[in-house]
Amino acid sequence: MSHEMIALSMFGGMLVMLLTGQRVFAAIGFVSATAALLLYGNGAIEMPFNAAFKLFNWYPMLTLPMFIYMGYILSESGVADDLYGMFHVWFGPLRGGLAIGTIGLMVVISAMNGLSVAGMAIGATIALPEMLRRGYDKVMITGVVQAGSSLGILVPPSVVLVLYGMIARQPVGRLWLAGVIPGLMMAGLFILYIVVRCKLQPELAPLVSKEELDMPFSEKLKLLKAGIIPFLIFFFMTGLFLMGITSLVESSAVGATAATLAALHRRTLTRQVMEDTLRQTLGISCMFMWIILAALCFGAVFDGIGAVRAIESLFITKWELTPWEILAMMQLSYIVMGMFLDDTAMLVIVAPLYVPLVVHLGFNPIWYGVLYTITCQIAYMTPPFGYNLFLMRAMAPPEITLPDIYRSIVPFVLVMTFTLVLIMIFPQIALWLPDMVYAR
C-alpha cells in the first residue's frame, strides 16, 4: 500500500470513529496505535511511551491547568457579575451600550480564562437575559454573545494557542503575543459594527432609562472597582511575563494565585466553589492532555510514513499550486471541518500535515497559528453544525430559536473574515508585538 493510501486510510478511519460519537482522543489514539502496530510491528508499542515522556517533559503543559483553574474560580466567585454591572452603568447611556459592554466583558473574560466556552456561558447567562429584558433585538445580541465569546481562543492566555504551540513545537509566549493585536482589533471591529448599526437602526437597541442610571458620579466611580481585580490579575500574569520577570509557567502560577486571593477578598471562596473549580479544572486538563498525547502518536506515525512529503509533492509538484493557493485551501478545509469538529480535534487531525507544509512554503508558523485560530473562530459560527451555534442554542432562552441564531452570526462572520484577510495581507499585525518583545 502506498504512503498516500495509508494516510487516507488513517484519516478515513479516524473520521468514521468521530462520526460514531467516540471521544476525540480515543478515536485519534486508536487509529494511531493500530496503524503503528500494522506498519512497524511489536516495536511500535514504545511509541505511546515516548509520546508520554515528551508530553510530561514539556514545561508549558503546566500552564494549562493553571489557566483553566484561574478562569473557573473567577467565574464561580462572581467577578463576572460585578464586571457586567460596571459595563451596564458606564455604557448604558450609549445607543447599543449594553451590547458594547458585552464585547468588553468578553474581552476581559477571555484575558482571564482562555476558553471560548466560559465566555459563552457567562454571556448567555448574564448579558443575554439582561439585554432581552431591555428590548434589544434578539438576533443582534445573540450574534454579539457568540462573536464575543469566540475571542477566548485568540486573546491570551489562549488555551488553543498553547495546544498549537505544543503540536507545532512553537514558543507559546510568541503565540500569545501574536494574538494580542488581532484579538483587540477584532473586538474593536465588533464594537464599530454595533455602533454603526444601532445608529442606522435605533429600534434595535433602546436606551437604558435615566432613572436606572441616575446615581451620583461618586457611585459610578465605585463601580469601577469591579474592573480593578481583573486588571491586576492580567497585569501580574501577563505584564510580569512581558517584562521578563517571570517565565511562562511562573506567570500561570501567579495568575492562579491572584485569582484565588481575589475570591478570598470577595469572601466567595467557599468549600463548594473550590470543589466545583477543582473538579472542572481536573476534567478539562486531563481531556487536553489525552488529546495532545494522541496527537503526538498520530504525528509520529505520519512522520514515519512520509505523509507530509507526499502532501507537499501532491500540492506543489503535481497540482502546481502557488503557496497562497495552498494556504487558502488549508483555511477552507478548517471551515469545512469546523462544521463537525471542535478546534482541538481539527488541530490534532491536520497540524501534523499542515505545519511542516507551512514552514516548507516559507510562511511563519507563528503567523499561521493566528490564522488557524481566527479560522477556527469562523468555523465555530458557520452553519449548519458550528460548535458555537449549538452551544448557544443549549444556553439561550426559549424565545431565541435556531434560525435566529443562524441569522445572528452573518455580520460577525463577515467581520472575522475581513480580519483574517487583513492579517494575511499584513502579517506584521500579528508579528510586530512578539518580534519587538523578543528582540529585547
Image (spheres, helix red, strand yellow):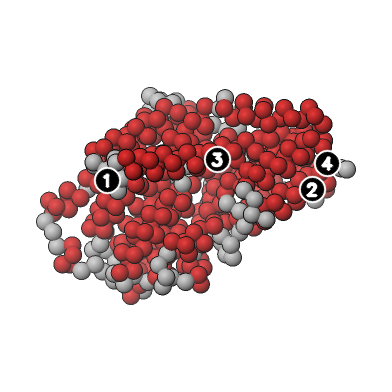
| Disc 4 to disc 2, C-alpha distance | 10 Å
Give x and y (percent) for residue 62: 49, 30
| Residue 78 visible here | yes
Q: Amino acid at mark 4?
A: His
- Please tell me the numbered disc located at residue 3: 4
Q: Residues within 10 Å of mark 3 (few under 14, many from 20)?
A: some
- Name the secondary structure under disc 3: helix
Q: Residues within 10 Å of mark 1 (few under 14, many from 20)?
A: some
Q: Amino acid at mark 3?
A: Phe
| Disc 3 to disc 1, C-alpha distance | 30 Å
Query: Which numbered mark, 3 or 4, is in the foreground of this view?
Result: 3
- Name the secondary structure under disc 2: helix
Which residue is the site of mark 2?
9
Q: Amino acid at mark 2?
A: Ser
Which residue is the site of mark 3?
288
Position of 300 relative to 198 (above/below): above
